[in-house]
Each structure stands twice: as structure tokens, then as C-alpha cells.
Amino acid sequence: MIFFLLAITADLLGGLDITGFGAILVRIIDIFVVLTLWLWRALKGNKNITNNYIYQLLGTFLLEVSPFGILPTWTTFVLYIYIKDRKTGRQFLAKKSKE
């Protein structure tokens, strides 16, 4: 839940992207958030390639620093990881991918 609150805060602060000073501040916050989320996933100890979220994290970061940065990408990413890490979430996503 700590990372979910971090993601929501980062997405809300992304609204400052409209101003010139806010754009610089938001980029610094995005770098902090991507490093924090990467550390979270690295400490989780997922060595399996199917659980490797590095490319997804990089894609989320690039989307966040793009002009579409006002979208709630950090929150969506953290929710996706949370659902994917739970057994019922994996079963649900596996069932949906077969359909």
C-alpha cells in the first residue's frame, strides 16, 4: 500500500507539469519514483524472466515523462503489479488471456 500511495501522489503532482517550474519538479519526482519502484521489484527477488517488470517499468517511466505524463501511469502500474502478484489475479489474467 505504501507504493500505491507513492504512485497516487506522483500522479497528482504530475498536474504541475503544466507550469514551467512544475515540469522540472515533476521530472525529478518521476526519477525518484522509478528508482523506488525498481528497488521494490529488485528486493522482491523475482529472478524469473516472466516476472521481470523492468521493461514495463521503463515503458511506464517513458510514458510519464512524455507529453502524456498527466495520465495516471504510476498508479496503473502499481495496481497491475499488485494484481499480477496475487494468486487470484494471476488466475484471472490467465483466464482472460485465453479468451
Image (cartoon, rainbow, N blue to C red):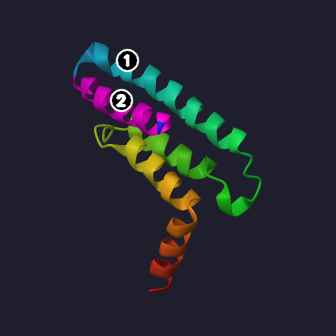
Q: Residue visible at 49% across and 79% down? A: 97
Q: In the image, is residue 32 above or below residue 5?
A: above
Q: For the view shown, which residue lies furthest in the left direction?
A: 18
The spot of residue 57 in percent (x, y) is 54, 45
Type of amino acid at the residue the image marks with label 2: Thr
For residue 20, what is the image quadrant? top left
Q: Residue visible at 44% across and 86% down? A: 99
- Residue 54 as seen in the image, left or right of residue 78: right
Type of amino acid at the residue the image marks with label 1: Ile
- Residue 41 as seen in the image, left or right of residue 57: right
Q: In the image, is residue 39 above or below residue 91?
A: above
- Residue 14 as seen in the image, left or right of residue 50: left
Q: Residue visible at 39% across and 43% down? A: 75
Local crowd size for mark 2, using a 10 Å CA cut-off: few (<14), some (14–19), many (≥20): some
* Residue for badge 1: 24
* Residue for badge 2: 9
The spot of residue 70 in percent (x, y) is 28, 37
Q: Residue visible at 46% across and 41% down? A: 62
The spot of residue 49 in percent (x, y) is 72, 60
- Residue 7 in magenta stretch: yes
The magenta span reads: 2-18
- Foreground mark, 1 or 2, reads 2
Q: How many marks?
A: 2
Magenta region, main secondary structure: helix
Q: In the image, is residue 36 above or below residue 68?
A: above
